[in-house]
Amino acid sequence: MLDPRGRVIYVGKAKQVRTRLLSYFRADHPDEKAARILNAAADIVWDYVPSEFAAYLGELRQIVRHRPMFNQRMNRTRKTLFIRVQGGSAPKVSAGGPLDENARCYGPFISAERVRDAVRGINDLLGLRDCAPNMPMVFAGQTDLFGVERRAACMRHDFGFCTGPCAGFVTEREYLRRVDTAVAFLEGRTIQPLDRVINEMQQAADAGEFERATVWRERFERLEWLLAAIARARTAVDGLSFVYRDPGLKGDDRAYLIRQGVVLASYPFPSTPIEQEAFRAVVKDALSAPAPSAGPLPSSHLDEILLVMSWFRRHPQAFRRTTPLNSWVA
């Protein structure tokens, strides 16, 4: 849907275009989304694609490209969330949907409550803040011209769960060191937070403080679960690397080159020796690029990764039409 100035205001897909378009004229109330889209639209443009997968992918890429005012971001269901590390002078580790392209994201996960509990445990152990992103930060050593007594903005500092970067109780260097430890834990490069939990749990048990030991054991179980969940999520994304033969409705099959959930290329499925040789060169070129590290997912492709992951989860038979990337260059 285009407005009078030619700007894209809505992107959609439909198996029957006529039926879908007529539905916009049947809105019962002018405040309904369909009526508002129709009132703002001056032109309609559509294109035909060979399959449902092509429609999903095309719709997503058009939304990412044009950012239409009537479209919501796709595929980020309420059950799907990420562990995100936001930037700024005092980075914040939290669980939820990606906020911006500058945030480092790990996942995806579907157990929202367990992920949030685990993230809260990491923040408490390392003394990281969980306040609003726009909270002013004042690190130790920064000059205060007015000599105002500083107080932490919440009780977490009083309880020993936050180092208090909002009130100058920690240096910027020390706080960033703690954030680096959290990131290393999320990327599987250290188990330092887990080591502390084990030590505290053992000390409480040796002292006969079994209630305190139980609290530390619960924290241990949360972090242990998180490590396993991160490994499963990364394995799932790494497993989405293959050539997918997508059958077209009219026999126009297409080959999608997918690496770690991102569609790198799409061509008519090669059937002749010359076409196969050309496609092998495309696959070989893709494999020559360094594989993404075990770090954060590429924020610019999160929606596409979720789309591909969702497609093969809902259509498990589609895996039968995939071939490993290496088989095309052997």
Image (tube, rainbow, N blue to C red):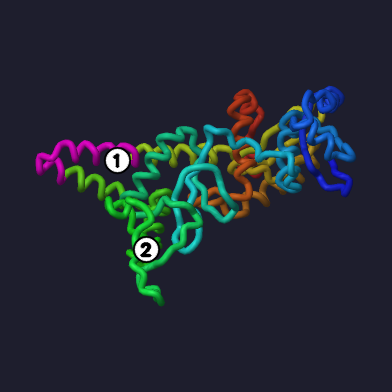
In percent of width and height, residue 102 lies at 57, 56
Alpha carbon distance from label 1 to label 2: 27 Å
Task: Look at 77% across and 34% down and name the residue there.
Answer: 12
Q: Position of residue 149 (x, y in %)?
A: 33, 67
Which residue in the protein does label 1 denote?
219
Front-lying residue, 221 or 164: 164
**Mark 1 or mark 2: whose residue is earlier in sequence:** 2
> Can the viewer see residue 126 in this picture?
no
Q: Nearer the viewer, residue 234 or 321?
A: 234
Q: Residue at x 36, y 66 (%)?
A: 168
Q: Give the residue type that dot 2 points to.
A: Ala
Range drawn in magenta: 203-223
Left or right of 197, for residue 289: right
Of badges 1 and 2, nearer the viewer stands 2
**Would you call the spot at circle 1 few (<14 residues within 10 Å), some (14-19), or many (20 or more)?**
many
Instruction: Judge whether residue 282 is colored magenta.
Output: no
Characterize the magenta stretch by its predominant secondary structure: helix
Quarter-wise, where is residue 43 in the image?
top right
Q: Residue at x 55, y 51 (%)?
A: 292
Secondary structure found at label 1: helix
Residue that mark 2 sits on: 167
Circle number at residue 151? none
Residue, x 39% and y 67% (percent of image)? 139
Please state the horizontal and vertical placement of residue 87, each as a whole percent of the image: 50, 58
